[in-house]
Amino acid sequence: MNQHPDSGQPSPLGATVVDGGVNFSLYSRVAAGVELLLFDREDDEVPTQVIAFHPGSNRTYHYWHRFVPGLKAGQLYGFRVHGQATRMHGARPDPEKVLLDPYGRGVVVPNGYRREAASNPGDNSATAMKSVVVDASDYDWEGDRPLRRAAAQTIIYEMHVRGFTRDPRSGVSPSKQGTYAGLIEKIPYLKELGVTAVELLPVFQFDALDAPEGKTNYWGYAPISFFAPHAAYSSRQDPLGPVCEFRDMVKALHRAGIEVILDVVYNHTAEGNERGPTLSFRGIDRSTYYILHNDQYANYTGCGNTLNANHPIVRRMIVDSLRYWVREMHVDGFRFDLASILSRDSDGVPLPNPPVLWDIESDPQLAGTKLLAEAWDAAGLYQVGSFVGDAWREWNGRFRDDVRDFFRCQPGSVRRIADRIVGSPELYGHKLREPEQSVNFVTCHDGFTLNDLVSYNEKHNDANGEQNRDGCNDNRSWNCGSEGPTDDPEIERLRNRQVKNMLTVTMLSLGIPMVTMGDEVRRTQRGNNNAYCQDNEISWFDWSLLEQHADIHRFVQVFCDQRVRRTTIHERERVTLVDLLCEANETWHGVKLNQPDWGDSSHCLALHAQLRNAKIYFHLILNAFWQPMEFELPSLDVGPWRRWIDTSLESPDDIVHQDSAPTVATNHYQAESHSVVMLIAGGRLS
C-alpha cells in the first residue's frame, strides 16, 4: 500500500480519531472514485471542503481510505461515490448525492431534510443527513459495566424513549420531554415498578419521514445508521450530544439496577425500494448491502428492501455494530426485529446454518449479552421454537396467541395454555435449554395495548390515513360486551379482571416475562393496533392513568417484587427446561383432582407443582368460564393453603405479599368467572 502520509488506512472502517487527525475508510466495490465532504453545519448548501480519494494512493482492494490532519470529534462529513453501471452490480451510484457513512457513529439531520431531495436527481447537500466524527474513548463511564443479570431474574419492560416522557403530565422538565435525559428523570418510576430491564424501541438513527405523507415514523423501524443513536431523542442538539446523552442514560439505568436492551433492525433500511431515496447504502454499493432480484429490491420485510445480511461485508458490519453498542455504549442486550431474515441467503433462501447468526452467537465480545429473536419475518418464514443456535431466546408469539385465545374462551385453547405456562416444552423441550428460552408476552408495541385487547373486537386505525386497511386483522381480542370506552361498571370490572388475568399468566409462566409500556396503567391507543405513525397522544404514555388505574399499577408492582425476590433452583445452578419439569412434581387437575378436562369445550384448568429441593407448593387455578367454578384442593402435610392471588378480588386483596397471604380454610376454592387464582403453601417464596 502507498505510504503517503495522507493515504490513510483501510482499517478500521468509518471515521476514527487518531493522533493529529481522523482516518476515514469506506468499502465500495463499485466505486470508480470517492469524495469526502466536510461541513461546518448540517444545513450547509455546499461543503466547506471536498477531499478526493485517489485510486492509486487512497484505495486498497475495495477499501477507500484517507487520513485528514487537523480534524477532531464533532466534524460533520459525508461521501460522494462515483462509478459506472455494470452487469454484475447494477445501476451506477449517483455522484450528486451526499451519503452517510455506514460506520458513522453520529448523525445530524438538517431542518430542511426531505426524502424527495434524496430520491430526485440533483445535488442535495443542503438537505442531506450528515455523519459526525465521534471519539468513542472520550467519555467517563465511572466504572460502569453491563449488568449481566441472570435470565431468571429478568423482567422486561418494552418502551419507547420518546413516548415514555413526551406527555406534558410526565413531570419531566419541558426541555427534556421525549428524550434520553427525560427517561433518566423517570428512572425512579421504573425502579418502583420493579422491572429489571428496559427494551427500547429502535434508537439507531432512523428516518422519521419514512411514513405516509403528513405522518411521522414514530416507532423507528426505518434505520439509516447502525452505529448512531437517534439524534431527535437527545435534549442536546450539538453534534456529539446524542452520543453523550445516550451513554448518560445507560449509566443511570445501570446504577438503578436496570439493564438496557435495544430493539435492533438489521433486516432493512429506510432507503426503501427502487423508487426510494439514496441516503447511504444504495449509493455506496447497493448489490452488496441489499438482496436484489432482477435488479429489483427483494422485500421479505414488508418495508421495501431486505439487507443482504449473510454477505461477508454486511455480516461484518452487523457484528461490528453489535460490538460497538456493547463495548462503547455498554448496552446489555438486543432484540432482533424480524430476526428470521438473518437466516436468508443472497437469493432469499433460508439457510440451515446462517453465517451471520453464528457469527453473533460465537463472538467472544458478545458473550453474556442477551440475544432475543423475533423469530419470523414478513414473507412467511416462522421459526418460533426452531431458531438456530444455542444463545438465542425467542419472542414467543405462540404464548401471546394462546393466552389471548384462552381468556376469550376459544375452543381447544386449554391444552395450548397449559404448555405455555410450563415454558412451552412443545416448542423448546427438544433443545435442552434453560427455562428462560421463551420471552413471554401478551402485548407489545405492534398490536393492541392490553387495555385495548379487552376493549375492542376490531381495529380502529382510521387515524393512520389508510382507510383502516393497515394493521393485523387477527387480534384475538374480546371487548367484554361493548366496543371501546364505556361507563358500564360491570364491563369495566370484567375488563380489569381480564387485564390482571393476562398479567398473572405472563408473570407466573416459566420464561422471561415482558410487559409493554403503559399496560400497568391500562394505556389505550383508542383501538389503533398499528400506531407506527402516531407521534401523539395515541402512542404516548398517559401519566394521568397512573392515578385512574392505581390498582393495576400496584398489581404489577407486587408481582415484580415477588418474582425478582423469589429463590428458585435454576437461579442457583443451571438446569434445563426438561430437568425442571421432570423434578417439579407437576400435576394437572380440573375442578376435580387429577381429572383435567383437555376437551375443546373446556375453559378451566388447575396446576399443582412443588419447587425442587424446597417444600414450597403452588396451586394455580384458571377459570376462563363465564360462571364460578369450585375446585378441589390437594391435601398437604406442610400446613394450609394460602391465597396469594385472586384476580376477581378488588385491590389490595387481588394480590398480596406472601407474608400476609390469608389462609384457605377448606379443601375447596371457588374461582369466580374469568379469574385466575394462585395458592401457596409451605416455605417462603423469597
Image (cartoon, rainbow, N blue to C red):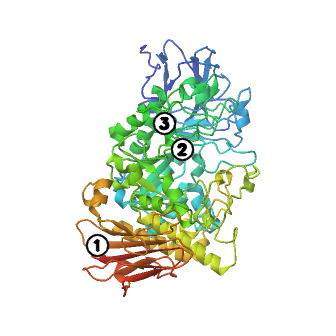
Report helix, strand or loop for mark 2: loop
> How many neighbours does mark 3 have within 10 angstroms: few (below 14), some (14-19), or many (20 or more)?
many
Q: Amino acid at mark 3?
A: Leu
Of the two numbered discs 2 and 1 in the rendering, the one whose residue sits closer to the viewer = 1
In the rendered structure, the answer to whether residue 642 lies left or right of residue 167 reads left
Q: Is residue 160 above or below residue 94?
A: below
Q: Which residue is mark 3?
A: 342
Q: Is residue 405 above or below residue 80?
A: below
Real-space CA distance between mark 2 and mark 1, rounded to the nearest whole angstrom: 45 Å
Real-space CA distance between mark 3 and mark 1, rounded to the nearest whole angstrom: 43 Å
Of the two numbered discs 2 and 3 in the rendering, the one whose residue sits closer to the viewer = 3
Q: Which residue is mark 1?
A: 616
Q: Are marks 2 and 3 in contact (CB under 8 Å)?
A: no
Q: Are marks 3 and 1 in contact (CB under 8 Å)?
A: no
Q: Amino acid at mark 1?
A: Ile
Q: Which residue is mark 2?
A: 204
Report helix, strand or loop for mark 1: strand
Q: Amino acid at mark 2?
A: Phe
Which image quarter holds the C terminus? bottom left
Of the two numbered discs 3 and 1 in the rendering, the one whose residue sits closer to the viewer = 1
The answer to whether residue 380 of the structure is visible from this angle is yes
